[in-house]
Image (spheres, grey):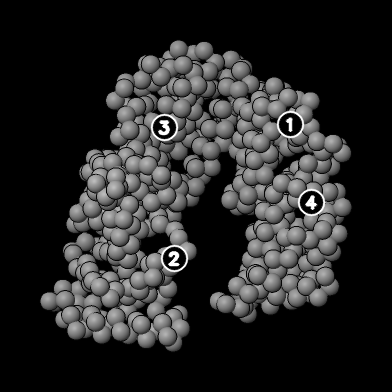
Amino acid sequence: MYERLTALLADIARGETLAGPDRARAVRRGAWLADATNEQLSEFLTAAGEMEMPLAPPADELLAAALAEVARRRRDPGAIAITDELIGPVVTLYQQLDQSSPSRAQLLALLARSNQPRVLGALVELMLAEPPTDGTQIVQALAPLFRRASATAGLPSSDRDTGGQATRGTLAQALFPRLLDGLAHPQLAAPVLDLANYLTRQGIEPVHPASSRARQLTALLGDLSQSLARLEESPPEDAASAVELSRRVASQVALAVSLCDALALIGDKGAIGKLNQALALAHRRLRTEAAAALARLGDDDGAAELVKLAEEPVARLRVLAFAGELGLTDRIDPKWQTPQARAEAQLAVWLAEPTQFGIPPQKLELFDQRRMFWPGFTGEVDCFLFRFTYQATIAGQGERSLSNIGIAGPLAHAFLADLADLSPDDIYAAYAGWQAEHEEIREFEVARLSKSEKLEAERLTRRLRDAGYTAIEPQRMGYFFGDKALVALATREELSGVTVADFREIVFFPQRHSRRPLGPREAYNIYKGRKLLKSFNRSEDQRAG
C-alpha cells in the first residue's frame, strides 16, 4: 500500500512533466485507488492535502482523474460506503485546492455518494462555504444526488437501508432546508432549486422543500423578470459587452426557469402575477416554463400560450412534454407533433445550446428525409437533414448570414465546415462517421505514428502520387476494421482539396469557394460513414437472405 501511495503522489507531483504515454501510464498506475478502503483513501487524501499548493493544472488533472475513478467505482452495487471518517480529509484537501480546481468537484461528488446524513451535511456546508465557481463542476458535484433520487423514486417511504443511511425521504432531510441558503450564491441557486424540484417531481418529497420560501421565490422571479426586461430594451452595442450580456442572460434565465418550476410544484397561486411578467419576456425557453407553470396553477391564459408556443421549434419539445403532463396534447396542432416537426425541434435546441450558436436559427428548412439503418440502433431510424440559416446585422459590415445543413433523428449535430456542396448521401455519411465509436475505428496524427506506421503512410503517399496527385501533405492515418487510410491535403488537376486513400480506393474532396471548406476530419468522417451506412443498409433481399 505504502509503495503504491508514494508512487501515485509522486506522479501527481510531477504531473507537469508527464505527457503522452507517460501520462497514460501514470493514470493506469493510480487505478488501484478506486478499490481502496476508506482507511486507505483517507490516508491518500491526507497526504495529497500536504502537497505544495496550489497544484499546477497538469498535476491537478491527474488528481482529479484518480478521484473521478474512485467516485465512479463507489457507485457500483456492493461498493464500499462513503462514511464519516472521510469528512475531515476531504474538507482539508478541498480547502487547500485552488478555487477553480477540477479536483474540488470530484471531492464533492465523493461526499454526495454517501448515504449517511452526517456526510451529506458536510457536503452542504462545504458547498455553501466555498461553492465551485464553474457551473459544470456544480453539476458534477450534485449528479450523484439526482441519480440516487431517481433510483429510490417510487419506493415506499418505509424502505430505507439499515445503519442510519439516508434514503428516500431522509435524503431530502439531510440536505434541506439548509441547502436552500445556496440561493444566495448566483452559481448555486439554479442547481439547488433543480434538485428540490426533482425530489418533489419524483415523489420523494410530498411537500416541496422550498414551500416555506414561496414568497422569497416569487419576489426573486419578479426581480429577474424586471432585469431581463431591461436588458431586452437596452442591449449593449460593443462585442465585449455583448459576450458578457449573453453570459448574464443565460445565468438569469436558468434561475428564472428553475423558479417557475418550483412555484408551480409548490402550487402557490400568489405567484401568478410574477409568472405573467416572465411570460411577457422574449426568451422562448423562459416563456415556455412560465406558461407551463401558469397552466399547472389553473391559469387558462397560460395554457393557451403554452399551446401556441408549439409553433416555435426551439420550444416545441418542452411544450409537447408539458402538454402531455397537463392533458393539453389534443389542443396542439397535429402538424407540430409529427416526426419531422420533432426532429426540427431537436436540431433547433442543439443549435441554441451555449456551446453551439447560443440562439436558435432564424430559418430551418427540410433538406432531405429518409428512413434507414443507422450505427448504434437496432432498427430503422427516421433521419432528417435541415438547412438552417442565421442572419445578423454587424456594425460596419452590414447584413451577414451563415447557412449550413445539420442532422436530426439519430442525433442532432452540425459541422462548422460547409456541407452545402455535398450530396445528401455524403452528408449523412459525414454525420455517421463522426458519431461512430468502435475499438477498431481509430485515427492518429501522422507525426505521432510509429516507424512502421509511417512506412504505411509513405506507401499510401506514393499511391496518391502515382494517381496524379501533387502537393501532398499527409495529415492523419485512419484504421477502419483492418483497413488503413491516409488523409492528406493534396492537389488534383489544379484543384486543392482533401483526399482519403486506402489500398483499394482514393476519394477526393475539392475545396470550393466556401469560407468553411471541408477539412481532413470531415473528409475522413465521410469516408468512414460511407462504409458504415453501406454495410448497415444492404438491400432488402440481402437482409432477408
Q: Position of residue 143 (x, y in %)?
A: 64, 44
Name the amino acid, label 1: Arg
**As rendered, which of 118 and 33 lies closer to the eye?**
33
Residue visible at 23% across and 77% down?
Answer: 490
Q: Quadrant of residue 521?
A: bottom left
Q: Is residue 68 visible?
A: yes
Q: Of callouts 4 and 1, which one flags the residue occurring earlier in the amino acid sequence?
A: 4
| Quarter that holds the N terminus | bottom right
Secondary-structure class at tag 3: helix
Residue type at the position of mark 3: Leu
Tag in front: 3 or 2: 2
Image-quadrant location for residue 483? bottom left
Please tell me which of labels 3 and 2 falls first in the chain: 3
Q: Quadrant of residue 494?
A: bottom left
Q: Residue at x 58, y 30 (%)?
A: 259
Q: How far apart are the two marked residues, 3 and 4, measured between alpha carbons?
A: 40 Å
Q: In the image, what residue occupies the spot 65% across and 63% down? A: 65
Q: In this view of the protein, which residue sits in the foreground, 318 or 148?
A: 148
Mark sitting earlier along the chain (3/4): 4
**In the image, 490: left or right of 125?**
left
Residue on which the image places disc 4: 80
Disc 3 + disc 1, Cβ < 8 Å: no
**Residue annotated with mark 1:** 168
Residue bearing the label numbered 3: 317
Tell me what residue is drawn at x 22 percent, y 44 percent.
367
Q: Secondary structure at mark 4?
A: loop
**Mark 4 or mark 1, whichever is nearer to me:** 4
Q: Are marks 2 and 1 in contact (CB under 8 Å)?
A: no
Give the residue type at disc 4: Ile
Residue linked to disc 2: 440
> How packed is label 3: few (under 14 Cα within 10 Å), some, or many (20 or more)?
many
